[in-house]
Amino acid sequence: MEINVLVFGQITDITGKGSLKFTDIKSTGELNQLLLKTYPLLGSVKYLMAVNKRIIHENTILMNEDTIALLPPFSGG
Amino acid sequence: MEINVLVFGQITDITGKGSLKFTDIKSTGELNQLLLKTYPLLGSVKYLMAVNKRIIHENTILMNEDTIALLPPFSGG
Amino acid sequence: MENEIASKINWTIFNTYKMEGKKKHKVFIEGPVSPAFIAESIAKHSSKTNIGAHSLFLGQVRNDKIGEREVVAIEYTTYQEMADEKFHEIREDAFKQFPLICMHIYHSLGLVKAGEISLFVFTSSVHRKDAIAACEVIVERIKKEVPVWGREILDNEDYQWKVNT
Amino acid sequence: MENEIASKINWTIFNTYKMEGKKKHKVFIEGPVSPAFIAESIAKHSSKTNIGAHSLFLGQVRNDKIGEREVVAIEYTTYQEMADEKFHEIREDAFKQFPLICMHIYHSLGLVKAGEISLFVFTSSVHRKDAIAACEVIVERIKKEVPVWGREILDNEDYQWKVNT
């Protein structure tokens, strides 16, 4: 099972790239822990997660080929 | 003593002209009575009076060379 | 202390200059407000780089149906001396009430056809809320307080006097 | 009775057509929104003679001071698939909430210099209150809900990420 993680805004400064791939991650909570371990600076920024373009506010089970986005505060307009 | 009366909007349909002159009129009340006598159709339209560009709501004493305007409801924009 | 006085003097001079600038601003234009004119007005503000938001209101002449007839144009007339004073008052009040960087009002006189623009209100500020709120207040005041009259010309060349709602 | 059903069917067809039209509308444009583009958008509405009022909001890039540096441009990026859905939702909601005749949203991607325009919201209605209220609601929602990010480029080529207030 594979998931795709998209990264935007100031978070790209931390990850150095706009998309990441992970395998065998069961939930957004698990993903978040792994991200914080891989990129400790993520702990200092505010962001929401979207699963398949829908913002989630609770731990969410992930499925094969899900797309998760890390969304720092929007600043359009 | 002479006063100048300016007429606008639909009231020009009644008076047939945009400005009128009167002599020896002492107040806006007296002017109004004379106007209604001269142009009875004025009784069927709503209008405010302005004395020297200032809208008045009470009977106002007139002075030589005052300009009185008959203002039907505004419809700009 | 001297600095304080100096800064007050500068402020006064600046304000007088601003008020004169405002007073000279011409509101009435003959015929419709063209999209090209609006574009030019917008473009002129690109040098004012402290502006963050513009709010624009455009009044367009509708071809309202009057029984079996329809409005093909509106002919606008005004009591110009009184209207100029009222526009000036609305402008002064808007600058007092809102932290605006710029404001412009243009109103047509004479004939404006259905589909053409007869009123253009344009406010600019650092933050969006001020431009938006000011623009709305100004439009409402113009409709209620400025002595302008619209004569609706019908497609049979008859007419009726417009009533604002 | 038959007429009633017929009119319902027509309404449904019309609405579906409208929704498709809305879905196809492209919001993002590369670089700034030019005043000429705005003028063209306005001019296109002169044939819709049932429109009485347009409300336009323009977001202009400010040269904010950041310590001793200043912002010379903003570079906009987006999560396009999600932004498109959000814009569509905002559009649908606006048409449900207000009796609008038209609405258009344009947002820049890529580099927009200070003094240039990065957001253009344009609403049109029969009566002014609807266009004005809808335009404000739409602007607020775009700022809060649409995944777009601005990177403020400073005059020493350093940058910082924009924060919306």
Image (spheres, coloured by chain):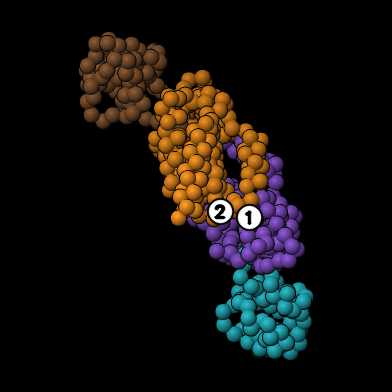
Chain colours: A brown, B cyan, C purple, D orange
Pick the front one: C156 or B30: C156
- Which residue corresponds to the image point at 37% horizontal and 19% vertical from the top-left? A7
**3D distance between C-alphas at marks 2 and 1:** 8 Å
Query: The residue tagged with tag 2: helix, strand or loop?
Result: loop
Q: Position of residue A43 (x, y in %)?
A: 27, 21
Label 1: how many Cα within 10 Å (few below 14, some 14–19, many 20+)? many
The residue tagged 2 is D126
Instruction: Say whether residue C131 is left or right of residue A63.
Output: right
* Labels 2 and 1 touching (C-beta < 8 A): yes
Res. B47 image quadrant: bottom right
Q: Identify the amino acid type marked 1.
A: Arg
Which percent across, then down, holds residue C123?
56, 48
Do we see residue D40 in this rendering?
yes
Residue A60: % across, % down:
23, 24
Above or below, A40 relative to D75:
above
Q: Residue at x 33, y 11 (%)?
A: A21
